[in-house]
Amino acid sequence: MGFIAYKAGTVSLQYVDDLPGSPTFGTEVQNAGTVLAAPPMHVIGVVLMGDEDGKLVELGRMYADSLPEALVKRVRGISSGVGKKEIAELLDRAVEVRAIVASFPSEAGLSQKRPFILEVKVADDVRSAFEYVMSKLGGKVSVSEVFSPGLYVDVIGVTKGHGFQGVVKRFGVKILPRKQRKTRRAVGAIGGRKPTYVTRFVPRAGQMGFHRRTELNKRVMAILDDGAKLTPRSGYKHFTVLRSPCVVLSGSVPGTPKRPLVLRAPAKSPKRVAGPPKVVSFMYGGEVLAS
């Protein structure tokens, strides 16, 4: 129910609007889209979760016999899993099955060698999900096996960091008049209460950006097995060339290029659901990438 991808850049999408009830239904429209590099994820383990007083607790985990060299020290050093026989005996008490996956940025053409490890829930009933993970254990899962064009996904990522900023830039507070006795780029009054304290609703200076955020319901416009088809001649700024499969989402996503993002099944799926979109062309800076 989830996948790890890396932000590459933005493109202009020309597609036929197929959302029922839209004012431009059936006509060709243009919108911004985001290209994500999505190399296959390595399935390195399985986790069984049980229910204890209404809370999810881990019953046991098992790792694949053969792991990539970059993962051996990290996985074996954190915790030792159980065997195949022991994990099967815990299946009757399990209420949820999760797959332990790893994504290598180097497979997307990035310089980072350290992989990202994530636990992803597997849909379906417990036994079917367990059998699916065991069949994929030690192998890879592509993005086309998890999502398909036309579906909606939630995007989890870290926003762009802007450092320590004042209240004007951070919250859009109005600048005070010219004849203000003290500073102008500040809040006029932080509160006159007894005993004196400042509520959490008063805008204050502080960190702006670099926060973990979740954006809901981004539509999957296209999934390409060869990302080179969507790479402009100059390459994407701050990312260069796509060397893996890619996903194109409608709209923008948080973060900077090269930053990892987690795509998951939507928590609040929209009521208006259509089939795979009919994309006419992808454009980047006036250059037609694919049609």
Image: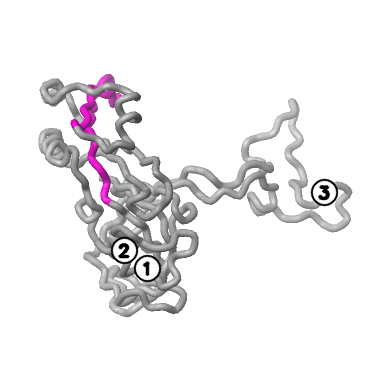
Residue 54 visible in the displayed image:
no
Nearer to the camera, 85 or 185:
85
Which quadrant, please, contains the N terminus?
Answer: top left
Q: Identify the image's colour scheme: rainbow, by chain, secondary structure or one colour.
A: one colour
| Amino acid type for the residue under numbered disc 1 | Thr
Are the residues flagged by discs 1 and 2 in contact, CB closer than 8 Å? yes
Position of residue 93 measured from the top left corner of the image (x, y, whole percent):
16, 23
Q: Gap between marks 3 and 2, in whole Å? A: 52 Å
Residue 265 visible in the displayed image:
yes
Q: Is residue 251 left or right of residue 136?
A: right
Position of residue 205 measured from the top left corner of the image (x, y, whole percent):
68, 43
Task: Looking at the image, tell me whether mark 1 or mark 3 is earlier in sequence order.
Answer: 3
Q: Is residue 268 left or right of residue 172?
A: left
Nearer to the camera, 64 or 89:
64
The residue at which mark 2 appears reads as: 227
Position of residue 160 measured from the top left corner of the image (x, y, whole percent):
53, 51
The residue at which mark 3 appears reads as: 183
Which quadrant, please, contains the C terminus?
Answer: bottom left
> Magenta: predominant secondary structure element?
strand
Numbered circle sitting on residue 231: 1
| Amino acid type for the residue under numbered disc 3 | Thr
Q: Gap between marks 1 and 2, in whole Å? A: 7 Å
Q: Is residue 113 magenta?
A: no
Q: Secondary structure at mark 1?
A: loop
Q: Secondary structure at mark 2?
A: helix
> In this rendering, which labeled residue sits more in front, label 3 or label 2?
2
Q: Which residues are magenta?
A: 40-65
Q: Gap between marks 1 and 3, in whole Å? A: 49 Å
